[in-house]
Each structure stands twice: as structure tokens, then as C-alpha cells.
Image: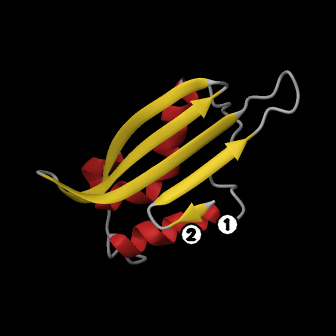
Amino acid sequence: MFEPGHLHIAHFALQPHDVGYDIHIRYEVSQTDAGIGMHFTLQGEINGKAVDETFDLLKDKAYNFASDASHILEKHGLPKTTDLHNMHGEYDAMFEDIRHQLHMKSGDPVKPEHLQ
């Protein structure tokens, strides 16, 4: 379920080998010494274990939030096969909301040093 600034994703373990999760991804514009960006908070649980992590992305890397969130959540037990991009349009809505909040447009440059 998506609302601006918040995405809630859940999957209930229906089979013994399934991984259940209930995760809230919250985000807000942030300002650091390196520039404007987005601050993300991941909270919830994966297979009954608590998740409470944060990360920050500069404006020109904020579009890559799903990759960063996936890597963090995988450390907590989310299966690598879980695709945050495939969330029935909710990913697209979150992506557009982030672009709107950061005043990003298609074709905006990415700093080469941020590609490493």
C-alpha cells in the first residue's frame, strides 16, 4: 500500500518454506553537507525478526532506492528473489513521488563519482 512518503509491503508465509515479511519504507527529503537527498527508514519484520534500518541517498542517486533497500533487507532475510520493482504499480508511484519531492526531471545528470 502506497501513500506519499510511505510504502507498506507485506507477504504472508503460506507454506513452511515461504518467507513472510511486513515492511514499512518511509522517506523524506533531507539536507546533508554533500547536498539534498532522501532519507529512508525501513521498519517491520522479516520471518518474525525485527528490521529497523535507515539509509540516505543524494538526489542524483535517489532513483536507485529499491536496490539499496533490497540489499539491506536481504541482510535481514528477505529472499533475493523478492523484486521491489514488481509491486503492482506501488513502486512506480513511490518513484514518481520521490522525483516530485526532489524536483527531478528525466535527463538530470548523475555525478560520475556517485556511480562507483
Residue at left offset 48%, top offset 39%: 43
Vertical arrangement, residue 65 with respect to residue 55, above or below = below
Residue at left offset 15%, top offset 52%: 34
Labelled disc at residue 89: 1
Vertical arrangement, residue 32 with respect to residue 104, above or below = above
- Report whether 112 appears left or right of 19: left
Vertical arrangement, residue 3 with respect to residue 106, above or below = above
SS for callout 2? helix
Vertical arrangement, residue 77 with respect to residue 98, above or below = above
Please tell me which residue lies in front, 91 or 63: 91
Label 1 neighbour load within 10 Å: few <14, some 14-19, many 20+ = few
Residue at left offset 44%, top offset 62%: 5
- Report whether 48 appears left or right of 15: left
Q: What percent of the width, then of the height, locates residue 35? A: 17, 58
Q: What percent of the width, then of the height, locates residue 55? A: 35, 41
Q: Are marks 1 and 2 in contact (CB under 8 Å)?
A: yes
Way the structure is coloured: secondary structure
Q: What percent of the width, then of the height, locates residue 40? A: 38, 48
Quadrant including the C terminus = top left
SS for callout 1? loop
Label 2 neighbour load within 10 Å: few <14, some 14-19, many 20+ = some
Q: Amino acid at mark 1?
A: Gly
Q: How far apart are the two marked residues, 1 and 2, measured between alpha carbons? A: 6 Å
Is residue 25 visible in the rendered image? The answer is yes
- Label 2 sits on residue: 93
Residue at left offset 80%, top offset 28%: 18
Q: What percent of the width, then of the height, locates residue 8? A: 59, 52
Q: Amino acid at mark 2?
A: Ala
Is residue 83 visible in the rendered image? The answer is no
* Quarter of the view holding residue 54: top left
